[in-house]
Each structure stands twice: as C-alpha cells, then as structure tokens.
Image (tube, rainbow, N blue to C red):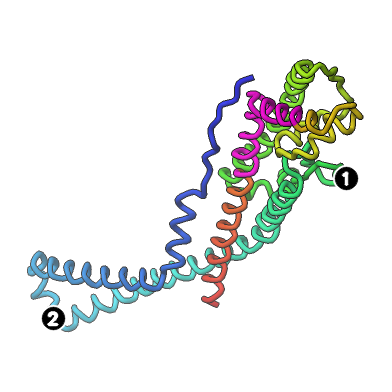
Amino acid sequence: MQYKKAAPVFSVPRRVKIELWVASTKGWLKAVLFVVFLLAAYAITNWAGVRFTWAAPLLGNPAVAGLVGALLGAAVGGVAAWVSSRQLLLQQFKAEASLAKIHTIYEPLYDGLLAFRAQIGECPYFFGCSFHSGGELRQNTVGFVEWTDIKQDSRYLDVPKWIATALDQFQKDIETYLQMREAAANATQPKIADIFASHSLNWYRIKGEDKHLLNSILTRDFESLKYSVCTGRKLQITDEITTRLCSVIQDECNQLEAVSNVAFHYEKHVVLRADQLISAIETVIQHLKMRYEAQDQLF
C-alpha cells in the first residue's frame, strides 16, 4: 500500500490569533483608536460646518438650540445606556461560559494530550492505543480517552468544528499508524529470512515476536535486536557473525518501504500532530482566560 508522505497542516484559526493579539495589546490599541476617533470627529465637524450652513440661523436661536441639544443628549444617552447594559450582560454570560469550557472541555483535553505525549516518549512506536475509558493499558500500549469521553456527552456541542475535526483526524492518524505497523512487521519477516539464508542459517518465526522485533529495528536498538534475532533463539554462532548479521538486518529492514512509511507516519502524523494539538489547546485556554479576566475586571 502506498502512503503519501506529507506532513499534516494544522494551526490555530486566524480569528483566535487576532483576538489574542488584540487582548495582549489592548492598552496602546485603545489609545490609537481614540486618536483616530478624534481625527474623524474633527473632519466630520469641518464637513458639517460647510454643508449645513443653512441651519446656522435656526440653531442660533438659544431656545431651539437648547431643545435640540436636550433631545439629542437624551436620545444618545438612552441608546448608549441600553447598548452598554446589554453588551455587559452578554459579555458576562460569555465569560462565565468560557470559564466553564476551560474546566470541562479544554483542560481535560490538554491534560490527556500531555499524558499521551509522555507515554509515547517512554514507549516509542507503541503497539496499541486505547480511546475508551475503563480499559487497563497493556504493555507497550498507550491511551488517549478524553476526546471519546467528550464526544459521548453534551460537551461535544460546545467544541469548535476546527478542534473537533483535528481531534478526529488525530485518532484516524493513530489507527492508520497501527495498521501500517502491522504491515511493516509482516514485511520484515521475508527480508530477515533472506538475510539468514545468505549466511546459511534457517529463520523461523516466533508468535508474538514480530512487534518487538520491529521496535528494535525502528528504534535502532542494536542490543535488543541481537537478543531477538540470535540470543533468544540460542543460535550457535560467534559474536562476530551475530553483530554482522544484525547490522545487515537493521540496515536493510529500515530501507523497506513499509518500515520507512511507518517511521515517517509516526513522526509526522502522531508525534507532530500531538505537539500541534497541545499547542492549539493551550492557545485556546489562554484565549478564554483572557476573555474571562477582561470581563471580570468590569465588575
């Protein structure tokens, strides 16, 4: 099977980055906007003075000018008060919702991704992955259950589409890696048999050994490979032949397309994708905390 060797493209949406930038630069940004407002008001005043000279005699009457001013002031003040109160109420609801999302959605996802990243650091080229809670992890198996848990309840409705799509793709990437890994383990067997035959040795397959043997090849763990291939089989050969035999196995098996595809997919679509998701979720948490803190300062 052919696999396209392309690194996944994934980043935080521009809208979130812009809002974070605005939140981090709001002090001087407000100052700039205030200056722009003053310049715009000055320009409009000059334009109105030229275009509405016909109203000068009418507005020159103190009674009329006072009435117009009072009406305009009341109207502007009433509209401004209504808009402000409505906006503050909406912002308060959004801030409280943002805080709830942090605790119920994003922090569990973030902690789960960090735990997954730590597990694959300790167990590179893992044999299996659990996506469901409650199961006990076996040896050389890792887990990422938080996204499945969220999809099974109402929290899923509050997850942005871009995050949901990225997490679904992440699970698919892990499943694809495991399928590719199994294919690569099978592909190494005839290659090793050929290498053994070239040294006038017979190769026999041991049930359940393929996964460990592939790990020794992928991680280039020479001592582990020597044990799996020769020592564990109690071959009556010299250390020199053992070293030469394992060196050839390691070099030629890593050149197999199935094996190189596994290595690439693991690094670019599992490890890199996990790092990207951790960074993205961290950015979202930061964004929501800024939104909550900005609203909290108003009360």
Q: Look at the picture and state if 151 lies above or below 296.
A: above
- Asked if residue 149 lies in the magenta stretch, the reply is no
Magenta range is: 244-272
Q: Residue at x 31, y 76 (%)?
A: 73
Classify residue 11 as left or right of residue 111.
Answer: left
Q: Residue at x 88, y 45 (%)?
A: 136
Q: Nearer the viewer, residue 267 or 218?
A: 218
Classify residue 277 as left or right of residue 51.
Answer: right
Residue at mark 1: 136
Relative image position of residue 179 (x, y in whole percent): 72, 28
Relative image position of residue 63 (x, y in whole percent): 19, 82
Q: Look at the picture and state if 120 lies above or below 24.
A: above
Q: Residue at x 79, y 16 (%)?
A: 197
Q: What element does badge 1 sit on? A: loop
Foreground mark, 2 or 1, reads 1
Residue type beneath disc 2: Asn
Q: Nearer the viewer, residue 279 or 253?
A: 253
* Labels 2 and 1: the sequence-earlier one: 2
Residue at mark 2: 61
Q: Nearer the viewer, residue 87 or 294?
A: 294
Q: Nearer the viewer, residue 213 or 229?
A: 229
